[in-house]
Structure formats: structure tokens, C-alpha cells
Amino acid sequence: MLHSTRGIVFHSTRYAETSLIVKIYTALFGLQSYLVKGVRNPKSKIKPGLFQPLTLLDLVVYHKERNSLQSVKEIRLAHPYQSIPYDIRKSSVVLFVNELVYKSIREEEPNPSLFEFLWAACLELDGTSSPVSNFHIWLALQLCTHLGIFPQSNYSSGFPIFNLREGIFQPAIPEHPHYIDQRSSLLLHSLLESCRSGPYQSSEKLIKPDERDHILETILLYYQLHLPGFKGLQSHHILHTVLS
């Protein structure tokens, strides 16, 4: 049966001589694998450039329940990015965000709020004229909400230490190494409050350049502690080089 859906490209791998298997996060079916035949043939009407990380697509697909590999009838670019391909900072952020969501999302079922969040975030990154040095941090924290692991915002002068294992602020240092000090906990609290305001704000006044890498490493450790199977990332090292 044919279905029309929007999709966000996460990952692609070569299959046979001319085809690709593409992981696409769809509005209707969650994360799915699609066989795109002949796309690497020079005469193909579908170009491989459509399957770059976080490309936004309109799709007409065949879908069969319990099939691990689905097929595609039509593929169109839903939104040609206007700035991301030409801005090394934005394109580096895209690589990080793509790796983060690809390693975080395993849902082979629809999640409308998560899909709409990711779609809107891609458009926001492409369209913003604000500095994007902290966009990846904002997105990683916002994503926690949709993954069901958003920390408790219970920070106060009496609860100044963030416990990474429990996802809460507490009065004293816990009896394990997974916590951050008072200064970093205050910064994390400020970022969490900023996230509650919704759309991306540059947060340049909140995070100093020398704090950015530490708070990002903290967030990634939090992911590892709360998402089973979540492994370390590689793209944030590139991001550090580009944004520094």
C-alpha cells in the first residue's frame, strides 16, 4: 500500500553497484530503512545528494508491517537548505545533530512530536541569522524531552549539585563519580531554563567558549547513562575544532 509522508535522512549505505539503503525518520512510520534502487547510476532521476544528513524529503513509499527493508516510489526535496551547505559552522552542527539523533532514536513507530521537533529544528538552523555556536547544546537538551529523559529542574541554593545518574539536583556530592560541580550545575540549570522558552536562542551570554566543550561532554555522558545502547559520538570533536 502506498503512503505519502515527510522524512528526515539519517544515514545511507551503498547497496550493490548502483543502489542505496537509506535510514529515514518518517512522520508516519518512525525510523525506517528504504532501498533506493539505481540512485548511483548517472542516468538516475534521483540524485545521491538527496540523502545527505538531515535532508528534508517528501516521500511516497510502500510500507509493509514487519518488513525490515521498505521501498520507495517517489522522492522529492521538501526544503532546499539555503545556508547550511555554505556555512561551515552550520554544516558542522548538522553532522553532530545527525549523529546524535541517529544513535538516540530507535523507534520503528510514529512519534509526531519528536518528528515535528526535528523538522522544525532543521528549518530553524537553516534560517537563523543568530550565532549557532550553541545550537547543538540547545538541541541535545530539547531532545531529552522527546526521549523521556529530561532532567528535573529542581535547582536551588540548597540543591546546587547535579547528579547525572538520577537526573536531579541535590544538596551534596553523591557517592559516585557521575556528577558535576556547583559552577557547572548552575550553568546546566540556566540552559535547562532557556530550553523551556522554546525556540533556539543563541545563549552566547550563558556559555563561554571554554565552558562549551565541558557542558557538551556532560550532556553526552548523561545520554550514555540514560539511553540503553547509546554509544559515544565522533562528530563533536570536529565541531570543537570548527567552533573554537
Image (cartoon, grey):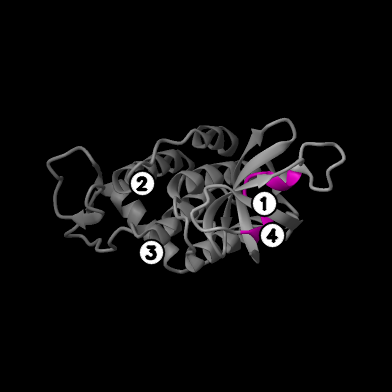
Q: Tell which circle, 4 or 2, labels the residue nearer the N-terminal end.
A: 4
Instruction: Report the side of 32 relative to 104 (left or right).
Output: right
- Checking the image for residue 223, the label placed there is 2
Residue 55 among those drawn in magenta: yes
* Residue 106 horizontal/vertical position (percent): 44, 50
What amino acid is at disc 4?
Leu
Q: Are marks 3 and 4 in contact (CB under 8 Å)?
A: no
Q: Earlier in the sequence, mark 2 or mark 1?
A: 1
Q: Which residue is mark 1?
A: 55
Amino acid under disc 1: Thr
* Residue 84 horizontal/vertical position (percent): 69, 49
Residue under the image location 54 percent in, 56 percent down: 202
**Helix or strand or loop: what does disc 3 sit on?**
helix
Query: Relative to residue 175, is residue 146 depicted above or below?
Result: below
Q: Are marks 1 and 3 in contact (CB under 8 Å)?
A: no
Q: Which residue is mark 4?
A: 59
Decide: few, some or many residues near mark 2? Use Cα within 10 Å; few <14, some 14-19, many ≥20: many
Mark toward the viewer: 2 or 1 = 1
Q: Is residue 104 visible?
A: yes
The image's mark for residue 193 is 3
